[in-house]
């Protein structure tokens, strides 16, 4: 096989439809656009979501709720997750290295889910009231 002999499979390629090239082509005169109207004009077509002047769907429906863009920077860690860590001191970098929180996370909060059996020192990490009690009961502290 040589590069100058390579061809696509038979029937894989077909000629592009040439519109507006005379009556013999089958797509002459109006070029398949019909007669008159907005869709027949060059550059004439409606925007996405346009419903012919009827009140559009996005304006008919009630606006409800709010999704904060800050949520991607916050994360929760459970007591069970903390129990799996080998380090005695836990901070944001430690949690990222262990894969417990994402790379974008800036704020972490410990929630009381599961058990904590070892003493850990948490640095610049928040905790719920129940989680704080569980950490201190295990001999740990929050700094």
Image: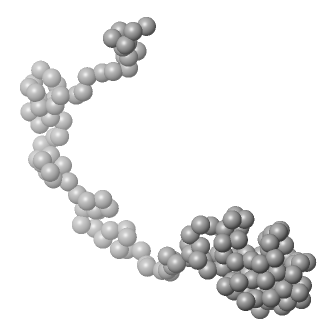
Residue plotted at (30% across, 71% down): 55
Answer whether residue 128 is visible to the viewer in this image: no
The type of colouring in the image is one colour
Residue 77 is drawn in which quadrant?
bottom right
Q: Position of residue 39 (x, y in %)?
A: 18, 49
Note whether 90 is above or below 132 in the view shown. Answer: above
Answer whether residue 62 is visible to the viewer in this image: yes
Residue 60 is drawn in which quadrant?
bottom left
Note whether 44 is above or below 58 in the view shown. Answer: above
Q: Position of residue 97 (x, y in %)?
A: 69, 65
Side of 19 relative to 100 (left or right): left
Residue plotted at (39% across, 9% down): 2
Which is more toward the observer, 100 or 70?
A: 100
Residue plotted at (89% across, 78% down): 118
Which is more toward the observer, 52 or 112?
A: 112
Side of 2 relative to 86 (left or right): left
Q: Position of residue 130 (x, y in %)?
A: 81, 89
Side of 15 relative to 106 (left or right): left
Residue 117 is drawn in which quadrant?
bottom right
Residue plotted at (30% across, 59% down): 48
Note whether 104 is above or below 8 in the view shown. Answer: below
The N terminus sits in image quarter: top left
Which is more toward the observer, 44 or 138?
A: 138
């Amino acid at each position: 096989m040589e590069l100058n002999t390579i061809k696509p499979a038979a029937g894989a390629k077909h000629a592009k439809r040439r519109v507006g090239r005379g009556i013999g082509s089958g797509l002459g005169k109006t070029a398949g656009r019909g007669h008159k109207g907005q869709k027949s004009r060059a550059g004439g077509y409606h925007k996405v979501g346009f419903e012919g002047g009827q009140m559009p769907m996005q304006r008919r429906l009630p606006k409800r709720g709010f999704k904060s863009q800050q949520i991607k920077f916050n994360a929760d860690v459970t007591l069970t997750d903390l129990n799996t860590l080998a380090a005695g001191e836990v901070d944001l970098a430690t949690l990222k290295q262990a894969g417990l929180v994402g790379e974008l996370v800036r704020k972490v909060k410990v929630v009381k889910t599961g058990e904590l059996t070892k003493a850990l020192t948490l640095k610049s990490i928040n905790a719920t009231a129940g989680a704080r009690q569980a950490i201190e009961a295990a001999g740990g502290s929050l700094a």
